[in-house]
Structure formats: C-alpha cells, structure tokens
Amino acid sequence: MRDKWIKKIKAFWKGWGYTLLISILIATSFKSVIADWNIVPTGSMNPTILEGDRIFVNKLAYDLKIPYTTWHVAQWNDPRRGQIAVFYSPRDGRRMVKRVIGTPGDTIAMRNNRLFINGEAVVYEPLESDPGAMEKNAETPVLIYSEDLDGIRHPVMVMPQRPALRSFGPLQVPEGKYLMMGDNRDNSADFRYFGFVERRDIVGQATAIVISLDILNKYAPRWSRFFTRLS
C-alpha cells in the first residue's frame, strides 16, 4: 500500500507538481517584487485611508528588490515628501502605512500639531468634517484640515481633547532614513513612537484604494471608495 501511494505521489509530481510549484513561485514573486495590496486594520491614516480599506502597493515605485527579501537590485527613485509609503516598522517589523514627512537631510519640527519643514511652516486650511471619514467610535471632537506637503494636498485629522504627543524637534533626518507620520495625527503610532525608517525597509508606494469594507458595519462595501486614487 505504501509503495502504491509513493508511485501516485511521484506520478502527480511529474505531471502537475512542477507546474504547480512554478505557478506558486511566479505568483508570490509578483506580490513580493512588483505589486501587492495591503489591508488597513486601524484608523491611523484617517481620513485619507479608513479601517477596512484595501490599498494598492506599487513595489516598483522606487526600486527593484530580490524576491522575498529587502535587498535592492536597482534603484531609480526615492520616496518624496507627501507620498504614502508602505514599510516595515523599525520597532517590531510589522508592515505599516504612513505618509512621508521628512526625507534625508530635512529638519523637521512640530508645534501643537503644526509641522515645520526646514524652518518653513506647513500651510493648513480648515475642511468641513466628513462623518464618513471620521472614527465612528471617537468620543472626542474631530477636526479635519488640508495639509500641503510640496504640492501634495491631503486631509489630516486632529482630536484636540485626546492625549497625544503634539510637539517635537527640531531634528534632522539622518542620511538613508525617513520620517513617517499618520494623517490621524492624534491617534497614530508613527515616528513619535518608533523613530526613523531605514530606506531599505520601505516596501513601496500606496497609490490607490482598491476595495473598501466598513468593518464597523458588518463589512458593508463603501462603493464610493472603490478604485480611488490616494493623495
């Protein structure tokens, strides 16, 4: 009986095994090197990215890596200030999604949630609050502003009554490292908690929302967010 099963396994391997293995390697290599998507489980990027959004990650935005590693084969670009990047946390290695605030050589400071980059105050404008973009379980008032980072305009959210680290610096971003923060400034575990991010630990750029499911409403689809670009 044992010999019979061994023959069947060998026959399967010769017939379909190689094809299956190659197919798996091609599929996983594509996700590892070219493109992937990321499920966002927290509200740290509210109101830009909501809990339950599935975001598209362009892994060729900055460089080409060896599959299943962070080793660079070629590099043609670097993350720009204002872009949304996916990276491995220097604290625990988890994959995270945050906005690039500081690039190598920048001097960054924050005073009561207002950013200063290389001595210049970032421009903010108030926006009307969008209930669909707020934390539904928020127990404190929420304010939403438009922030301009090198021409990339995007909303940021603050919760004035929530305890948070709202000031730091000025400090200079070291060579080969980046300063990342969430758009939900008072509820984001970001640079203020894990420090600078190494260039080699940046996976790619988040460019769009593919699918959005409301995890607080029985995973109902948020149709208006499907296939929308991120800014």
Image (spheres, helix red, strand yellow):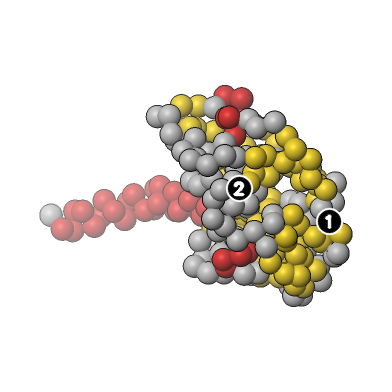
Horizontal side of 26 relative to 217 (left or right) equals: right
60 or 178, which lies in front?
A: 178
Which of pointers 2 and 1 indicates the residue nearer the eye? Answer: 2
Q: Is residue 26 above or below residue 93?
A: above
Looking at the figure, which quarter contains the N terminus? bottom left
Tell me the residue at 54%/33% (across/down): 212
What percent of the width, then of the height, locates residue 101?
A: 73, 58
Residue matched to label 1 = 121
Residue 129 against residue 1 in the figure, above or below: above
Q: Earlier in the sequence, mark 2 or mark 1?
A: 1
Element type at mark 1: strand
Residue at 48% x, 46% y: name it.
41
Q: Amino acid at mark 1?
A: Ala
Residue position marked by numbered label 2 in the rendering: 160
**Residue 5 vs residue 125: left or right?**
left
Within 10 Å of disc 1 (Cα), the crowding (few <14, some 14-19, many 20+) is few
* Residue type (three-letter) at the residue carrying disc 2: Pro
